[in-house]
Image (cartoon, grey):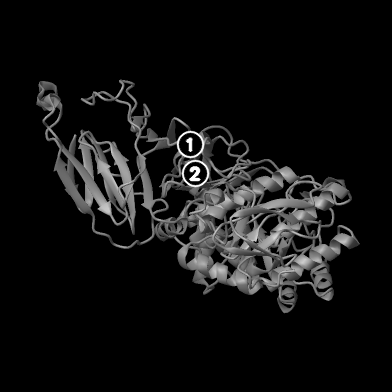
Amino acid sequence: MRIYEENNRLILAENRTQVWIEPWGKNSLRVRMTAEPKMDENDWALTEPVEACKANITSAEIDVTDPWYQSEEYARYHQTAKEWQLTNGKITAKVSYEGWISFYNQRGELLTAEYWRNRNRINRYCVPLRVDARELKPIQGSTDYTLVARFEAFDDEKIFGMGQYQERNLDKKGATLELAHRNSQASVPFYISSRGYGFFWNNPAIGTATFGTNKTEWVAKSTKKLDYFITAGDAPAELEEQYSAATGRTPRMPEYGLGYWQCKLRYRNQEELLAVARKHKALGLPMDAIVVDFFHWTRQGEFKFETRDWPDPEGMVKELKDLGIETVVSVWPTIDERSENYGEMSDKGYLVNPDRGMNYHMSWMGNTVFYDATHPGAREFVWEKCKENYYKKGIRCFWLDEAEPEYGPYDFDNYRYFAGPALQCTNIYPVMYAKGFYDGLKKEGERDILSLVRCAWAGSQKYGVLTWSGDIHSSFRAMREQLQAGLNMCLAGIPWWTSDIGGFVGGDISNPKFKELLVRWFAWGAFCPVFRMHGERSPWYEREEEFIDGVRQLTSGQDNEVWSFGEDNFEILKNYLLIRERLRPYIRECMKTASENGSPVMRPMFYDFYKDKTAWETEDQYMFGPDLLVAPVMEEGVTVRSVYLPEGEVWTESYTGKVYEGGQTVVAEAPLAVIPVFVRGENHYNIY
């Protein structure tokens, strides 16, 4: 192997294989590897201009007094006895003479290291398992590779981030995670380690990440190169800031994003929706946004209001605007074979193509194909239709649903995009989907852009993406799972996040158990980045089927407004609407900080209290901004719960006004009307 310095990077070369290690912004490095004559030029999510940093590259002769280094075998396989290191601020990559890479902080402490168990050269200290840290294995009959990258495991390490997965654990150590999007699953492969570094897998290919007890292993099923970003810092906030500088930061949150959003499955027509908005305001209740959900169109892929049920969109939008309510319209990327746009989009290559079989991706409410959001022409085509039929009628906020996209089935090996085979790049689909609308709105002169999107990948945040956690179940178990999903999504660099309050599937509004769940979830929603009601509300299928020109129209669920769950519960929900309004200045400041330095609005306890060991162990509570500790009740029938108060601070319980010293666990009162919230310091916000 030949190791040398060139163009501010360290290069490890052997045959056609090259590894590049180079500075990539403050305290950060980018590592790439190719087995081709030329490095693949895709930057994927690392597209932002970062701070220029000069690498400090040094080399040193290794100790050759050991007789081993005088051996004929050594002379035959190694040209020079040097070890190298590249330093960029607080991070150093050390490269052994055989090409093994390890990473250290500015204090010389090991952060992580490649996993090598190979004696194919002269390392007599390793067992001969023939396991390399980096493998690009050619896929026979193609120009592509299967990639595996391995790193050492550490017993003391905790892993946080990686996006949104439907399970209970905040700490992903011990987990195997699919690097793929599905309905309610969003792979955003950046994590923060308790060892003081952040790691981003800059590859949108289908694969897996395993954080095992014996090794950490990343796999891409089909790709052109290895590409990752690693950053070091003294605090989680520093890591988040450096990562977001490289992948992009969220824009400024529009004012309507700070308040309450009303939504259901679904308002069937204009009068239904307006009646809800009018009643809300007549009752003196705050509402910032209301959603015109899916199938307000006749056919999927026509991107316009169905004129029978929505006869005057301009008038509707104006009335809502006069009430102080933003209109949000759902857009799906599915194109029905019967739609007026299918033929043109197919002819122009704007649809996702299969490698085999029929070209249908979903058969729900029509045979449909997803449009190819990686195709610049397709993005522009869809935006122009939405501009003509929505934007010109006053719509400024779009709900970009089905953004994974939700293939049925998820046969990733069968789909092909403008950008390449789905196996290699499908995880960028939601990024490009959002980009099309962001670019279109920006071109029209809009400044504060927000799109509600059901999936995200690294870089989505810079296109004004508000993600939600998909079609989740209406249960306390699902609610608890959303807490870790939201925290890990925010840590992965997507600071605008929300869930369907009450869950999406299975909530019966006449069931007392569901009413309890709804109230608990609503209280928690008031302390999420975006406060949004939604759900199908069973039994939605009992309503009579409707048809327009022979096309079946989707029916709707039961009522889903704050007055729909009983008078006693209405008073509780009303109180949380008002609490959210009182918090508006605080939330606005948190959103500003997220835009400026990438800090998530909603974050785990260790983010602000990383020196407190217990904070790293606490998973069922979180910080909402720097000053509010929120401990939601996520179990049926519970009226008290324990809360850990981090050390070094004084904490005021908002409901009772009691003041506690930090560094202890207390029991908080939590009747149905109360979510335990503790305020940092003695001068606390008037929440209740």
Residue 214: quarter of image: top left
> Would you say 8 lies left or right of 504 here?
left
- Residue 233: x and y, percent? 39, 55
- The residue under the point 36% across, 26% down is 140
- Residue 529: x and y, percent? 62, 62
Q: Name the residue under label 2.
A: 159
Residue density around tag 1, few if under 14, some if 14–19, many if 20 or more, within 10 Å: many
**Residue 472 visible at all:** no
Residue 477: quarter of image: top right
Residue 433: quarter of image: bottom right
- Give the quarter of the figure containing the C terminus: bottom right
Q: Which amino acid, by three-letter code, is at mark 1?
A: Phe
For the residues labelled 1 and 2, the Cα–Cα distance comes to 8 Å
Tell me: residue 120, above or below residue 115. above
- Residue 431: x and y, percent? 50, 54
- The image's mark for residue 211 is 1
Q: Which amino acid, by three-letter code, is at mark 2?
A: Ile
Tell me: residue 144, above or below residue 368. above
- Residue 18: x and y, percent? 25, 39
- In terms of depth relative to the viewer, which is nearer, 169 or 21? 169
Secondary structure beneath label 1 = strand
Residue density around tag 2, few if under 14, some if 14–19, many if 20 or more, within 10 Å: many
> Would you say 250 lies left or right of 256 here?
left
Disc nearer the start of the sequence (1/2): 2
- In terms of depth relative to the viewer, which is nearer, 135 or 197? 197
